Amino acid sequence: MNFQQLRTVREAVRHGFNLTATAAALFTSQPGVSRQIRELEQEIGVEIFQRHGKRLLGLTAPGETVLEIIERLLHEADNLKRAAEEHSNQRGGHLIVATTHTQARYVLPKVVGTFKRDYPEVRLALQQSRPEQIAEQLLGGRADIGIATESLLDYPELVVMPGYEWSHVVVLPDGHPLLSAGRLTLEALCAWPLITYDPGFTGRPHIDAAFARAKLRPEIALTALDSDVIKTYVELGLGVGIIASMAFDCRRDAGLRTMDVGHLFEANLTRVALRRGTYLRGFMLTFLERFASHLTPAYVRRAMAGDTRSPALSR
């Protein structure tokens, strides 16, 4: 048994049991993939995959169990490398942060800037993804830290910690009639076409829930993943925008105005996630604390050990 065999099984599952795609991911040949799988099956004495001829169709019942063990072994192999690097090269390494567009565009630039200044030898990569993809990247070892508002709590294999709270704002062209309407109501918003986030993104569930509770059906004229896209179409006069508060900058967004809607929509909580059991290098802990000051090394280590007490949010 060797790690190449274990990685081959994992990649075969990740690539939907497609041997050609698995071979490409591993930079080997399709016969080489088949050989690695067969040799592992012969050694452990069970068939991992269901087959039709030479095609893989899925995992067998024993294969499901084997895959769980393989994932743990490969995860611990990664931990071993991290631990060795921590002692041999404390200032260098790599860090992959999977996050949404809103976090990458509006929240992380300051964090990344100070981090890169202090850790120039760390190769830092930001992967912009959908919230559910962020969890999958963490579980698959393709990301070290995940940051998102939605979806992360759905995975028990992740340790999820609070990051910061934020609210939505309404964004309008300067001179819009709603600006003189006083305290906004859901009914007043329903009188206008709305432009906001795609379902499942950037607090959209809280927006939908508020209208549903009031038994109102707003006209959603346009949706987008990107706050800048929403603001662009608000500027064109296509509707009233609802965006994350941190996505508005009065200097950059000249010509637009905002109105508070914290009384209409529930506050949102951006969370930080790590795969359970991950070895945390020093610079990973630094990055987390730069993102939210309450995520101290001591708190993060307690959370990884199973302490679920929430800290007072730092911002």
Image: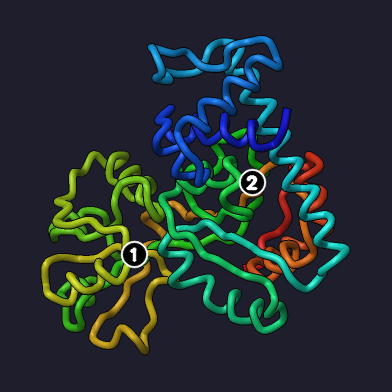
Kindly identify the amino acid type of the residue bearing the numbered disc 2. Val
Tell which circle, 1 or 2, labels the residue nearer the N-terminal end.
2
- Residue occupying image coordinates x 62% and y 70%: 123
Cβ–Cβ under 8 Å for marks 1 and 2:
no
Q: Position of residue 100 (x, y in %)?
A: 44, 58
Left or right: residue 36 versus residue 288 is left
- The spot of residue 38 in percent (x, y) is 58, 20
On the image, numbered disc 1 is attached to which residue?
A: 243
Question: Which mark is in front, 1 or 2?
Answer: 2
User: Which residue occupies 34% across, 64% down?
Assistant: 243
Tell me how far mark 1 sits from mark 2, CA to CA.
24 Å
| Residue 182 figure quarter | bottom left
Question: Is residue 301 shown above or below 290?
Answer: above
* 85 w.r.t. 132: above or below: below
Which corner quadrant of the image does residue 282 belong to?
bottom right
- How many neighbours does mark 2 have within 10 angstroms: few (below 14), some (14-19), or many (20 or more)? many
Counting from the top left corner in percent of width and height, residue 277 is at 75, 41
Going 20% across and 66% down the picture, which residue do you hit? 240
**Furthest-right residue in this view:** 87
The figure's colour scheme reads rainbow
Q: Is residue 152 visible?
A: yes
Q: Nearer the viewer, residue 314 or 124?
A: 124
Residue 182 visible, this orientation: no
In the structure shown, which secondary structural element does the residue marked by tag 1 occupy?
strand
Name the image quarter holding residue 94: bottom right
Find disc 2 in the rendering and name its residue: 160
Q: Callout 1, which amino acid?
A: Ile
Query: Which residue lies at the image location 64% right of the left edge and 63% below the top edge?
Result: 95
Of residues 209 and 145, the one drawn nearer to the viewer in this rendering: 145
